[in-house]
Image (cartoon, rainbow, N blue to C red):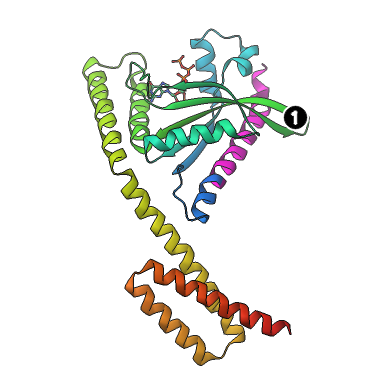
């Protein structure tokens, strides 16, 4: 690789990161729009810096000419989940996709690294379209819980600070913290269904409220003001009662009223 060309070489990887981020964020939003609990909480992405690539090339004794084939995390996506169960749902979801091919899977949750690092890694082959034509590249997807991410972020900074010379006391402390994360994730899994229910209800309620407000806004254009005020007062009354079922029923009735006005205006 000619060093002066590195920006150009990394361009398809930047494109892949952008595309993959959009795709996984779309998955997250699709769940939310459907009023469903999303196994994806957050999506991040980055292209490995040239200094980090050079470091890996040196560490792994890779020829600079082969780095694209040998380093599979030049494009990196991180998917953060709330619960361990969500990680395996996301893994299934990725396995089923037709726009990326899984070429390697490493379960560092079941086989925790000696450092205490836990995450699910998937290496995918992904095609990007460049001005020079299509290019297949590797990308690494790291899937972990919020708690695992907290640990990995802190540990990564310390690794960077101490390189190979992390003091033993600190290393032991990080291992202990990693074990605490295992317990925390396990405890959180026990309340998962409660949390999912709460989050589902919240998403459903905000979707229903958004639909009602859109309908009321549209009614202002066609219905008389007295009727709209009556509808609005009824909405506030039901909203304050916090009864989701009644709110959903009200939304359906409002749909029928709006549909009636729409049909009238077309005559
Ligand atoms: P960065 O800065 O995250 O981009 P190996 O050297 O064989 O152990 P390899 O081939 O680099 O590992 O692949 P592996 O093990 O799948 O690790 C790839 C990435 O996983 C790392 O990228 C880290 O992001 C993360 N990772 C792996 N092990 C650890 C760990 O012990 N602690 C933390 N915090 N993260 C880890 P890089 O290359 O470190 O760089």
Main secondary structure type of the part rendered in magenta: helix
Instruction: Tell me which corner region of the image, top left, top right, bottom left or bottom right, holds residue 177.
Output: top left
Instruction: Tell me which corner region of the image, top left, top right, bottom left or bottom right, holds residue 146.
Output: top left
Quarter of the N terminus within the rendering = top right
Q: Residue at x 51, y 72 (%)?
A: 252
Q: Which residue is drawn at 50% across and 32% down?
A: 91
Span of residues in magenta: 1-26
In this picture, residue 215 sits left or right of residue 177: right
Quarter of the C terminus within the rendering = bottom right
Q: Nearer the viewer, residue 60 or 108?
A: 108
Q: Position of residue 261 (x, y in %)?
A: 63, 83
Q: Does the magenta stretch include residue 255?
A: no
Q: Position of residue 64 (x, y in %)?
A: 61, 12
Instruction: Confirm or reject: label 1 Cβ below 8 Å from ligand 1.
Output: no
In this picture, residue 187 sits left or right of residue 211: left
| Label 1: how many Cα within 10 Å (few below 14, some 14–19, many 20+) | few
Q: In this view, does 58 lie above or below 249?
A: above
From the image, tell me which residue sits under label 1: 134
Query: Dividing the image into four equal quarters, which quarter contains ligand 1?
Result: top left
- Helix or strand or loop: what does disc 1 sit on? strand
Q: Does the magenta stretch include residue 15?
A: yes
Q: Residue at x 69, y 25 (%)?
A: 136
Q: Is residue 149 above or below residue 60?
A: below
Q: Position of residue 72 (x, y in %)?
A: 56, 21
In this picture, residue 236 sits left or right of residue 259: left
Q: Which of 11 and 111 is in front in this view?
A: 111
Q: Which residue is drawn at 39% across and 78% down?
A: 236
Q: Which residue lies furthest to the top in this view?
A: 61
Q: Where is residue 73 in the image (x, y as percent from the top left)?
A: 54, 24
């Amino acid at each position: 690789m000619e060093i002066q060309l590195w920006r150009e070489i990394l361009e398809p990887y930047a494109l892949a990161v952008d595309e993959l981020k959009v795709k996984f964020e779309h998955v997250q939003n699709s769940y939310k729009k459907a009023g469903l609990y999303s196994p994806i909480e957050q999506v991040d992405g980055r292209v490995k810096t040239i200094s980090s690539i050079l470091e890996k090339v040196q560490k792994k004794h890779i020829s600079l000419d082969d780095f694209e084939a040998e380093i599979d995390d030049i494009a990196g996506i991180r998917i953060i989940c709330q619960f361990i169960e969500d990680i395996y749902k996301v893994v299934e979801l990725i396995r089923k996709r037709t726009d990326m091919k899984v070429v390697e899977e490493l379960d560092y949750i079941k086989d925790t690294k000696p450092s205490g690092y836990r995450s699910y890694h998937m290496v995918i082959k992904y095609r990007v379209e460049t001005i020079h034509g299509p290019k297949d590249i590797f990308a690494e997807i790291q899937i972990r819980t919020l708690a695992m991410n907290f640990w990995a972020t802190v540990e990564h900074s310390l690794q960077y600070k101490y390189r190979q010379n992390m003091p033993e006391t600190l290393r032991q402390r990080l291992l202990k913290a990693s074990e605490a994360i295992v317990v925390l994730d396990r405890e959180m899994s026990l309340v998962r269904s409660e949390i999912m229910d709460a989050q589902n209800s919240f998403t459903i309620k905000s979707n229903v409220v958004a639909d009602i407000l859109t309908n009321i806004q549209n009614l202002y254009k066609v219905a008389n003001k007295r009727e709209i005020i009556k509808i609005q007062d009824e909405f506030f009354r039901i909203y304050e009662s916090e009864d989701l079922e009644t709110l959903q029923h009200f939304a359906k009735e409002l749909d029928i009223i709006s549909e009636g006005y729409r049909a009238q205006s077309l005559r």
